[in-house]
Image (cartoon, rainbow, N blue to C red):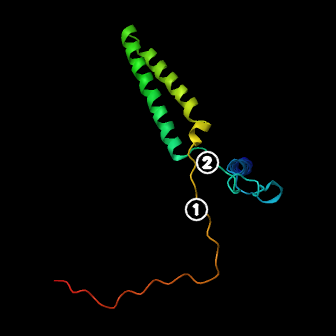
Amino acid sequence: MLKHKHQSWLKRRRRRIIWQLMRTAAVPLRGRNRINTRNHPQTSGHWRPLFDYKGQKLAEQIFQGIILISAGIGFVYGLIIEQFGWTVYIVLAGFAVSCVLTLPPWPIYRRNPLSWQPALPESTAEPSQKPQESTKKKKHK
């Protein structure tokens, strides 16, 4: 009897977890919880990426620069006062600052958007056939 109640509780818990995952992943659901895909940012034509390629490179350079500078300052400061804990605190503070500067999609990271080619119209014709290769065979020496 106890085992049966435990199994039904697990089933309810699994369903709740799956439902929450589906809601957060923006997967279209069945029934009244279905997502309107016309206004969804990934399906509409007006969706812009959070970072472009040059923005990703800039964010990576800023992140690495702040980490290196804070590690250098932390090492020197910890060496002077002979406390390794302060080195760790300064590096963690540098990490936090670099996360604040590089993780949100700031407009500085979207200055160079990609220009996409227009979509090709769908045709009902058969796909083009490959050109036939020449019938002459080359002789190897």
Q: Establish if 99 lies above or below 19.
A: above
Q: Is residue 91 left or right of residue 26?
A: left
User: Measuring 78% from the left and 56% from the top, which residue is drawn there?
Assistant: 36
Check disc 2 and report the residue beneath it: 49
Spot the residue most to the bottom: 135
Q: Nearer the viewer, mark 1 or mark 2?
A: 1
Number of labels in the image equals 2
Q: Residue at the spot x=58%, y=84% of the render?
A: 126
Give residue 87's quadrant in the image.
top left
Residue beneath disc 1: 117
User: Taking the image as drawn, is residue 105 in sight?
Assistant: no
Task: Look at label 1 and name its amino acid.
Answer: Gln
Instruction: Using residue 27 as the reference point, say whether residue 33 is left or right of it.
Output: right
| Residue neighbourhood size for the residue with mark 1, other residues' Cα within 10 Å, grouped as few (<14), some (14–19), many (≥20) | few
Q: Position of residue 129 (x, y in %)?
A: 50, 84
| Disc 1 secondary structure class | loop
Please report whichever mark, 1 or 2, sits nearer to the chain's N-terminal start: 2
Q: CA distance from mark 1 to mark 2?
A: 16 Å
43 displayed left or right of 127: right
